Every structure is written in structure tokens, then in C-alpha cells.
């Protein structure tokens, strides 16, 4: 039984529960040590529910092809909006990323905004190991989770199954913060949910979509 759940984010299609926990647990303990918290949790008290494989193409152990230019041209409004917002925030925090303001009034005219955003984000030191179109493909996982009901249910069930009576802390990263929030809302009796223990920070695009479609969580 895990007291602490750690819910991963996008780009983890080829990891697994044990591999993710091996990376997260030392980081969690180091962070608690920095703020003087003791005792830090043992690895046996933590668990990382895994859902990345649900994003793999059906019937294949490997990945599908990296999205091409045609996929970028066919991107929907939500995908482009999320990509554009990441560009804005990246330019604010990373001087190597050119600002969207350089494009003036033409910035949000489809479909060029997606292409311009990926070209700009490719300069970021935080995305140095990413191919631009690969990043776009992984980012699509956020939109798929929010809008594809069968996939959403499968992923949420993976996390809900790990919430047991002794679970009292749920940590989420990236898309995992949204999944963790929804899981806690789905099992309010199992989690002592306090604002000090629940901090969900995401993009305005993602959070507004979440709020519209999952209004039942708003009072928790």
C-alpha cells in the first residue's frame, strides 16, 4: 500500500512503474531534505502508476511514426492554442527562444503559428534533445487525454486503482497534475485533500478546458 502516489506526465510511453519510481524517489527525498523535513519517505511508501503505454499505437510494442508536416497542418485549435501558450511562456523564461511578439498581429493566424512555435521552441536549451515534430506529437497527449473519452477513462482508472485507504498524498507532474487532480476528485473519501498538499499548476488552455468539462471537481 502506497502512502504517496507520483503521477507522471507526457513523453513516458516507454518507461514503467519501477523505472519512474527509481528516478522520482531520490528527487523527492532530496527536496524534502532541503526544507528540513524528516523522516523522508521510504521507497516502499511510494508508487508511480504508469499509463504511458496507453498512448502507444494499438497492436504495436514500439512507437508510431513521428508526426509529419501534414499532421502539423491538420492540428486543431486546442493543439495550436496549447503550443502557442508554451511558446509565450518559454520566451519569457528562456532568452534563447525568440518572442512571439516578433510576428506582430500575424502570430495567431492558422496554420503558421504551429510551425513558428515549433521553430522557436527548438532553440530552447530545455528541448535540446527533442525533434520539433516529436515534441508536437508528445504534446498531443494532453489534448487526447482531455477529449478522447475512452483513452481518458483507461488512464484515470490506472491511477484510481492505486489510490487505497492509506494513500494520503498525490503528486502530479505535467499532464500528471491534471490526472492526479481528477483522481482525487473521483475518490474524495480516500484522500485527505488539503490545499497545502494539492497544487495543480498548468497552462490556461489546459486548465480552462479541464474546468469546463469537469466542473464537478470545482468544489473540492
Image: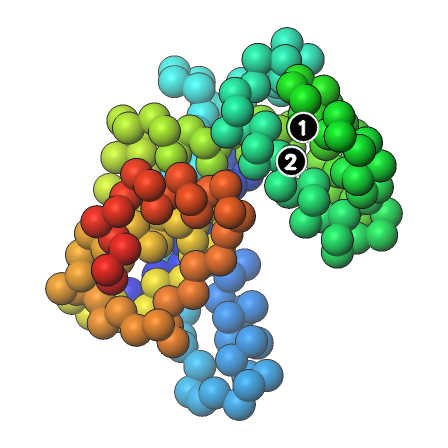
What residue is rendered at 28% in x and 65% in y?
A: 2
Q: Which residue is mark 1?
A: 108
Residue 118 lies, in percent from the top left, at 73, 30
Numbered mark located on residue 84 in the image: 2
Give the SS element for disc 1: loop
What residue is rendered at 67% in x and 28% in y?
A: 108
Query: In this view, which residue lies farthest toward the front?
Result: 105
How far apart, in angstroms, are the residues tagged by discs 2 and 1? Answer: 8 Å
Horizontal relation, residue 218 to residue 93: left or right:
left
Give the SS element for disc 2: helix
Horizontal relation, residue 154 to residue 59: left or right:
left
Label total for image: 2
* Between marks 2 and 1 in the image, the one whose residue lies nearer the viewer: 1
User: Looking at the rendering, which quadrant does residue 113 occupy?
Assistant: top right
The image shows residue 10, relative to residue 24, as above or below, that is: above
> Image quadrant for the C terminus?
bottom left
What residue is rendered at 44% in x and 19% in y?
A: 57
Query: Quick one: label 2, few (<14), some, or many (20+) residues within 10 Å?
Result: many
Give 21 or 186, whichever is nearer the viewer. 186
Horizontal relation, residue 145 to residue 107: left or right:
left
- How did the renderer colour the structure? rainbow
Q: Is residue 164 visible?
A: no
Q: Are marks 2 and 1 in contact (CB under 8 Å)?
A: yes
Amino acid at each position: 500500500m502506497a502512502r504517496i502516489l507520483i503521477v507522471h506526465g507526457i513523453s513516458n510511453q516507454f518507461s514503467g512503474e519501477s523505472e519512474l519510481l527509481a528516478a522520482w524517489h531520490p528527487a523527492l527525498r532530496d527536496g524534502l531534505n532541503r526544507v528540513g523535513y524528516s523522516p523522508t519517505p521510504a521507497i516502499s511508501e511510494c508508487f508511480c502508476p504508469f499509463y504511458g503505454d496507453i498512448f502507444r499505437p494499438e497492436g504495436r510494442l514500439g512507437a508510431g511514426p513521428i508526426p509529419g508536416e501534414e499532421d502539423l497542418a491538420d492540428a486543431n485549435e486546442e493543439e495550436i492554442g496549447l503550443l502557442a501558450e508554451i511558446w509565450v511562456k518559454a520566451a519569457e523564461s528562456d532568452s534563447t527562444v525568440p518572442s512571439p511578439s516578433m510576428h506582430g498581429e500575424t502570430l495567431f493566424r492558422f496554420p503558421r503559428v504551429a510551425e513558428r512555435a515549433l521553430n522557436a521552441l527548438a532553440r530552447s536549451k530545455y528541448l535540446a534533445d527533442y525533434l520539433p515534430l516529436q515534441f508536437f506529437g508528445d504534446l498531443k497527449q494532453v489534448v487526447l487525454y482531455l477529449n478522447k473519452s475512452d483513452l481518458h477513462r483507461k488512464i484515470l482508472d490506472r491511477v484510481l486503482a492505486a489510490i487505497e485507504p492509506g494513500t494520503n498524498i498525490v503528486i502530479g507532474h505535467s499532464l500528471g497534475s491534471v490526472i492526479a487532480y481528477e483522481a482525487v476528485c473521483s475518490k474524495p473519501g480516500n484522500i485527505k485533500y488539503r490545499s497545502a498538499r494539492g497544487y495543480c499548476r498548468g497552462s490556461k488552455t489546459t486548465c480552462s478546458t479541464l474546468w469546463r468539462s469537469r466542473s464537478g471537481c470545482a468544489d473540492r
